[in-house]
Amino acid sequence: MTAQFPAARPRRLRRTTAMRRLVAGTRLHPADLVLPLFVKEGIDEPQPIGSMPGVFQHTRDSLRKTAHEAAEAGVGGLILFGIPAVKDARGSAADDPEGIVQKALGDLVSDLGDQMVVMTDTCLDEFTDHGHCGILTPGGEVDNDATLERYAAAAVAQARAGSQVIAPSGMMDGQVAAIRAALDGAGFEQVPILAYSAKYASAFYGPFRDAAECAPQFGDRNAYQQDPAGPVGEALREVRLDLAEGADAVMVKPALAYLDILRQVRDAVDVPVAAYQVSGEYAMIEAAAANGWIDRDRAIMESLVAIHRAGADMILTYWATEVAHRL
C-alpha cells in the first residue's frame, strides 16, 4: 500500500448500507446455523427455561412444531438433547429404543426428511442420576473405557432411530474410534461423526445444565473437559486425535471466549469446523438486553459474525431460527 491520506480514505467503503453490504467479507447464511433443542419425557406442554428466555424443554409435539419452523426458515440443522423421566447410574435411557431421544428422532426424521440435518448429542450426562458424562468407578471417578461402551451403544441406537449425524460430547479419550467402530459394525458406515473435539470446562454452561437437568451431583467435569488455561497445543492435539479416529467434522465449545482456538483449528484442518454458541453466551446477551444495557439484535448478529469470521463453518446457536428469518 503506497497511497496515504488524503488520497487513501478507507471510509469511502463504509459510507452507506449498500456499500457496506457490497464489500462485506463475512456473510452468514441460514444454512450455516444449527438449532439445539431439548425434548423432555413425561411433560404435557413446553416448559420454559428460566435462565434461557425463549428456550424450552419440549414435548414431542412442540418439538416437531419448533423443528418445522426452523426448517421453514432455512436453518441448516438441529441437534437434539433428551431428558428422560427416569435416570440411573449407567444412563440406560441413552440407548433404550423406546427412550425419549429415539422416539423424538423418529418424529423428526419422518417430518423433515431432507429439509434439514437432524443431529444428536451423544453423551450420558442427561441420562445419569449423578449428572456426570460417563460410568463411575467405585471411587467416584469417570471410568473412561467403560464409558466408551455406553457411548457406542447410544450412538448405534440414535443411528437406528434416524440420526443423520452423531455428535459425541463427553470428552472421553478414544470416543470417536469407539463410536466409529460401533456404527460401522451395525451397518451405519454412512453416518458421519461431528466430534466435540475442543470442549472446555467452562462457566458458560450453567443455563444448559438447567435445560438438560444434568448438573453433576458432586464434583465437576474438570478431569475430562479441557482446562481453559491448559497446555499450549492441547486443542489441536485433541482435534488431530479425533480426525485420526474417524471424525468427519470437529467442534470448538464454547465459541465466543475461544475464538483464538477456533482460528487455530480452522487453519489446521481440512474438514468442516463447528462452534457452539453456548447457553451462557445466549443468557448474557438476553439478560443485558432485557435490562436495556445493549442493543439485543445487534449484539446477536455481531457475536455470530465474530464466530463465523474466526473460522466456523457451522454455528450451533439458540437464535438459529430467529437469525435465519432475519437473514
Image (cartoon, rainbow, N blue to C red):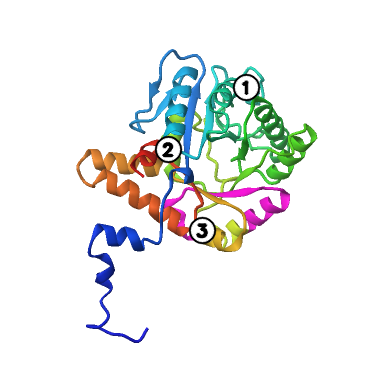
| Residue type, label 2 | Gly
**Is 153 placed left or right of 226 in the picture?**
right
Picture disc at residue 206: 2
> Looking at the image, which residue is at 69% across and 44% down?
176
Question: Which span of residues is magenta-colored?
Answer: 237-261
Q: Which residue is mark 3?
A: 261
Q: Residues within 10 Å of mark 2 (few under 14, many from 20)?
A: some
Nearer to me, 11 or 155:
11
Q: Nearer the viewer, residue 241 or 90?
A: 241
Q: State the residue at coordinates (28%, 85%).
A: 4
Badge 1 element: helix
- In the image, taking residue 30 as reference, residue 267 lies left or right, namely right
Q: Which residue is mark 1?
A: 93
Please tell me whether mark 3 sits on a helix, a strand or a loop. helix
Q: Is residue 178 left or right of residue 168?
A: right
Q: Specify whether residue 276 is in view.
A: yes
Q: Separation of disc 1 and disc 2 at Cα?
A: 23 Å
**Residue type highlighted by circle 3:** Ile
Q: Earlier in the sequence, mark 3 or mark 1?
A: 1
Report if residue 198 is visible in the image: no
Crowding near the residue tagged with mark 1, few <14, some 14–19, many ≥20 C-alpha atoms within 10 Å: many
Q: Earlier in the sequence, mark 1 or mark 2?
A: 1
Give yes or no for residue 241 being in the magenta stretch: yes
User: Disc 3 to disc 1, how far (Cα)?
Assistant: 34 Å
Tell which circle, 2 or 3, labels the residue nearer the N-terminal end: 2
- Residue 132 pos. (x, y %): 58, 34
Residue 156 is situated, as x and y percent measured from the top left of the image, at 70, 30
Label drawn at residue 310: none
Q: Is residue 132 above or below residue 26?
A: above
- Residue 269 appears left or right of 181: left
- Identity of the amino acid at label 1? Ala
Picture mark count: 3
